[in-house]
Image (cartoon, rainbow, N blue to C red):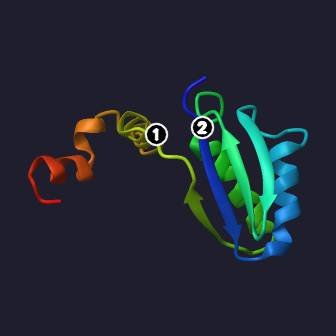
């Protein structure tokens, strides 16, 4: 298993939380979802991105939120390596040229600007 991704999703309408929980942990949930739990006004989702792409998991969340005409705020709860961030960005943006050497923070640090 690769490094899991853990996010907290805060829907603009807390009434959507039960539907999000069912969609991500019930029958038909994305295969890579490892755990789903409620935490206050959010739902915490942990998944293996090699089994379920970021686009798939966030797509399920967004589909459920559309039923409530709701939006979301998402917080990344686990740090990801630069390599993993670049891999996700390349896959999600369909831009295979994206690599760790193209991460802005790294380039700024190398230039002594941060």
Query: Most extreme residue toward the left, as rendered?
Result: 111
Q: Residue 81's spot in the image, x, y percent?
A: 41, 38
Question: Sequence-wise, which precedes: disc 1 or disc 2?
Answer: 2
Q: Relative to 11, is 19 above or below?
A: above
Give the residue pinned by disc 2: 53
Element type at mark 1: helix
Q: Give whichever of 68, 114 is nearer the camera.
A: 114
Element type at mark 2: loop
In the rendered structure, find residue 11 and report the number of the disc placed on it.
none
Q: How many marks?
A: 2
Residue at (9% x, 54% y) in the render: 112
Q: Residue 18's spot in the image, x, y percent?
A: 88, 62
Q: Quadrant of the N terminus?
A: top right
Query: On the image, which quarter does residue 35 sit in?
Result: top right
Q: Relative to 54, is 10 above or below?
A: below
Q: Give whichever of 44, 16 is nearer the camera.
A: 44
Q: Give whichever of 101, 63 is nearer the camera.
A: 101
Residue at (83% x, 50% y) in the render: 23
Task: Rate crowding at label 2 as few (under 14), some (14 to 19) or many (20 or more) other CA atoms within 10 Å.
Answer: some
Q: Give whichever of 106, 55 is nearer the camera.
A: 106
Q: Residue 49's spot in the image, x, y percent?
A: 59, 34
Task: Rate crowding at label 1 as few (under 14), some (14 to 19) or many (20 or more) other CA atoms within 10 Å.
Answer: some
Give the residue pinned by disc 1: 88
Q: Quadrant of the C terminus?
A: bottom left
Residue at (85% x, 38% y) in the render: 28
């Amino acid at each position: 298993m690769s490094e899991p991704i853990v996010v907290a999703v805060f829907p603009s309408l807390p009434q959507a939380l039960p539907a999000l929980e069912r969609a991500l942990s019930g029958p038909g949930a994305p295969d890579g979802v490892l755990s789903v739990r409620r935490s206050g006004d959010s739902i915490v989702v942990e998944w293996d991105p090699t089994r379920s792409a970021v686009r798939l998991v966030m797509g399920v969340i967004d589909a459920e939120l559309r039923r409530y005409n709701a939006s979301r705020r998402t917080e990344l709860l686990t740090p990801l390596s630069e390599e993993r961030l670049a891999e996700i960005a390349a896959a999600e943006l369909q831009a295979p040229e994206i690599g760790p050497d193209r991460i802005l923070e790294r380039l700024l640090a190398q230039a002594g600007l941060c």
